[in-house]
Amino acid sequence: MTRLPARKLAPFVLAGTLVLFPGLAGAQDSGSPLVDTFLACRTIADDAERHACLDRTSAAMAEALQSGEISIVERERAVAAERGSFGTATTGTGGFLTALLGRTTGDMSRVQAYGDGTQAVRSDTGEIEALLNVPVQEAGHGQDGKLYVVLSDGQVWRQTDTRRIHLPRNTSGLTVSIRRGAVGSYFMSLSNSPLSVRARRD
């Protein structure tokens, strides 16, 4: 069995990186020739041949990892990256990650809950359309009188219209919901008010 060159091992590319997930280990069609070859080694009956095959393919995988041709990303990190891209110029990356995640889990729920109480609402294509009930780390009004909100994960969102939004004296327990609008716009609402404002992410 010949050694697979690392440069040919990336059928799914995201910013030059192949994303592999642990859940693929039970499949023989992972989408990566390197992973498929590695898994196929396990089926070789002869011990010496099986070990030699595993040694060759693991060496190829190590070389590909070292060169940056592939990157192994845990599912938890991929989900966090998808949520973190919401509202940025890289929005759209989430759909790619979601497709891979859906492939490993067999389920792509329209509403996904995170550990901090945040809910992500997805479109039919798997893109995040809204983040609901996101814990607020800080909220206030800038010098222009417009609302700004710092989310629990550090994202900063700022109001872009002139509607006045009341903030409670004690913002402990305050949450915010952010929804995608038309043509790249976003709307933000606080849990203490039924009003929503146009917003953008810093």
Image (spheres, grey):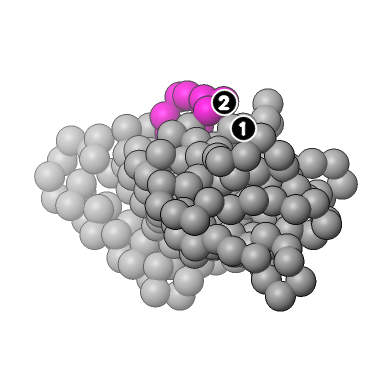
Q: Is residue 104 magenta?
A: yes
User: In the rendering, at what x and y percent does residue 17 appear?
Assistant: 54, 62
Is 32 in front, or is 91?
Answer: 91
Of the residues shown, which amino acid type is indicated by label 1?
Arg
Looking at the image, the residue that sits furthest to the front is 169
Of the residues shown, which amino acid type is indicated by label 2?
Arg
Asked if labels 2 and 1 touch by Cβ distance under 8 angstroms, the answer is yes
- Residue pointed to by mark 2: 110
Residue at coordinates 71% horizontally, 39% vertically from top-left?
Answer: 195
In the depicted structure, whether residue 50 falls above or below residue 144: above
Residue at coordinates 49% horizontally, 62% vertically from top-left?
Answer: 138
Is 70 in front, or is 37?
Answer: 70
> Can see residue 175?
yes
Q: Is residue 12 magenta?
A: no
- Residue pointed to by mark 1: 122
Q: Quadrant of residue 28?
A: top left
Question: How would you rate the neighbour count of disc 2 (Cα within 10 Å): few for under 14, some for 14-19, many for 20 or more?
Answer: some
Q: Which residues are magenta?
A: 100-111
Is 158 in front, or is 164?
Answer: 164
- Quadrant that contains the C terminus: bottom right
Q: Secondary structure at mark 2?
A: loop
